[in-house]
Image: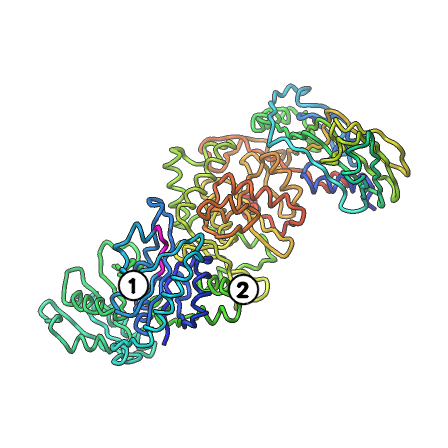
Amino acid sequence: MHVYFSHSYRDVAINSYFLRHFIREDIPLFADQKSAIWCVAKLERYMFETRGFISVIPRRVTEKEAVAYSQYIGHELNLARRARIRRLLFVDEQVLERYELDFPEDAVSFNPIEPDRDSERHIAAITAFRKSINTSSNTLRNVRCRNQATVVVDDGAAIRNLAEDVCELLRRERFEVRQVLTSRRSRALDDIRLLETLWRSELCVFILGERLSDTHITLAMAHSHCIPSVRLQFDKRATDCAPSLTGLIHWQSASDALIEFKRQLTSFRRGFVEPIEIAKGSNVVEAARSVGTTQWEPTKQDLWDSQDGPALLNHVYPGDPLVQDQVNRIKRELRKSLGTDRSRPFSMQVCRSLYDGLKHHKFVYEVEPQIGLDPGIQKIRPPSLIEQSQAATCIDLACLFASLLEAANQNPLILVLGGGGFSHALVGYRALDEPAMHSNSNLGDIRGALQRGDVVLFETTGVVEAEAPVGVEHQAQRQDKLLDFMDAKEAATRFIGQTEAHLLHVLDVVGLRQQKTA
Amino acid sequence: MTSPVQTYQSEMHGNLGFFATWLPGDPIEIGDIGIFEAGRFRRMLSLKELGIKYKTEPAGSMLDVQYASTKGTTINAPIAANIKSIAKANITIDFSSAGAFVFHASKMQPHRLENRMAVADQILKIYQRKKWEKSWLLVEAIYTAKCATVIVAEESSAQLVLAAKGGDIVNSLSFSDPKVGLSIVSTRGKLFQMIGGKDLQPLYSCLRLEAPFFGKPSVQPVRGVGENASVLEFSRPSIDELLKS
């Protein structure tokens, strides 16, 4: 008997508050370890395998709305409602007031600043929920067969070819596969044996053609019963295979679709994590952080030996599509070809525009766990993974900014600093009329360059949401968990000025590239 | 072996990233041209003398700084509560290693060469006329200080006792506040001292123009610029270069 815990990974403080209560009431929670893959089939499986659903829904500030909430949590709630499992919702009081009809009537409000103010009400709701799940049951769970997969396939050669490959991949994962071919003449809506087949399946895969067909109707039936499903929709206009919020994967290239299907299958197979058990072994804050840290498998290219400063250059990707998109955006904003103006004010303008642009994405700060890595080896996310996981560490961001600045014809600098048991990465640029920095430059050189204005540095994590200061910025400087550019700049300068700081690496990206080509 | 002056210069460079003038009261200006010699900048001529026009501008904000060497300096001042009521207070500074120092400066302001690219173009022309030496350094930034006190121990045991007007030193223990009115009571051992010096340039930084600028004194395209522009091949001398000169 377990309960699925739906929550916003980035709101560690409020999650910790509720985790404390859940521990007291001994609610056995399952949660989805944060990953870069959005897999609706896995969430549907979770709904299937748990007896209840608890959601903590905090306020989220977006570009358009000061009061909003995560659409992903909203989708999880819809899945739970569709699965008809017991639920308990704690919703930020402002969110509940503004979006009352999005939530069932039994939602319980909380104040994010002083949640303890309503702790009695919260405890009462948790106690009642605890009692209710003891008596609930999921009838569909009893008919489901482990390792049975059903692939429902539309008409069309390309679709049927992809279906064969999907079936093969499923077989390799030890699934017993049943393929169902539909056409516009089949009567899926009335086919009770088809519905029972769906109920029995651990996983269904729908390979949909462009025109509405019985495959779509079968998917609708599975959807309404919250049956774990991967939805592959053929679409001639598809540009990538990223799944939508509802889990629909648009594809036009079968090979791309297969790659995404493999990712979905890997994610689907992944187990729950148990935040209460983690908290018992550490504490609630650590548990909330641990579940909310993106799990990802690095390739060799994503690993950096932290003793090798110049090797950071391998993690600077000025040609990356995300990087190019950002740089093209600022070209339009500044209405100027980058590189024609070599003045210091223009370099500052470019840097600030890049910073503000990235800030709008509302990525979140994460600390990369050093699990499974050799000592001194650090994982660095490439830009695409930062975008997918919506999260980054200081070194990820330093490399991303270096990529952006280089693509914008500036001279990026990455600094890795240590001192007092910490290490931290800062980023910035040197003015275009300033000589390149040597890799053996010391902190004094950096301090002097900052004073002269030859170098501008900023706190990289200022663009990502963090509940507590990451560098030496003041808590008050983080407005809605983010830093303004000027505050990020001030924080970096203060970091450099600390007596206990010491410089581990300085990477002058353009200088180093020139050296390598010389 | 590191000399006391080298220790002072090395640590000040670590603190602020500028070279410390030696002697601290020696004048130095943006546009000065010279070389490092025996741990100091020896001025030879200036941009002005070469007929090169340049502009300077303040860089960064004004600040008061107080540094002491990382080891070997102990400052003993009377407890604040006790000196408010007395007219004069004695402050004892003990130095226990050669090179130990105290550097206090008020209203420090960095200034820098503003039109560096234009200056480089003019230097290029002078180079082509064989009137620019490769070893020359150009002072392109300085710190000015309204008031500064610099004390450097030149041997491993030294002491300086200063008298200050009581109430004025209570809050900051600043040796560069003109209101404090410092005077020397006694000294022991060999010390360099400049107490309350006015309108100084205690710190500077410089650039060298070098190969391939000198190897190819020509106009080449600059990255990201469609048209030709001069390549700025500046480099910055390191602190080691100054210390080993």
In this rendering, do the residues under marks 2 and 1 share a single chain? Answer: yes
Residue drawn 48% across the image and 61% down it: A289
Is B145 on the left-hand or right-hand side of A512?
A: right
Is A214 on the left-hand or right-hand side of B101?
A: left
Residue drawn 38% across the image and 36% down it: A333
Q: What segment is highlighted magenta in the picture? A: A90-94
- Judging from the image, mark 1 belongs to the subunit labelled A
Q: How many marks?
A: 2
Separation of marks 2 and 1 at Cα, in angstroms: 32 Å
Placement of A86 over or under B13, stated as above or below: below
Q: Where does label 2 land, which residue?
A: A370
> Is residue A477 something one can see in this rendering?
yes
> Percent position (x, y) of residue B215?
62, 35
Nearest to the observer: residue B107 or residue A372? B107
User: Which residue is situated farthest in the left direction here?
Assistant: A185
- Judging from the image, mark 2 belongs to the subunit labelled A
Q: Depth-wise, is mark 2 or mark 1 nearer the camera?
A: 2
Q: Where does label 1 land, which residue?
A: A257
Placement of A493 over or under B114, stated as above or below: below
Q: Amino acid at mark 1?
A: Ala
Crowding near the residue tagged with mark 1, few <14, some 14–19, many ≥20 C-alpha atoms within 10 Å: many
Q: Amino acid at mark 2?
A: Gln
> Is residue A518 something one can see in this rendering?
no
Is B154 on the left-hand or right-hand side of B44?
A: right
Residue A93 is one of the magenta-drawn residues? yes
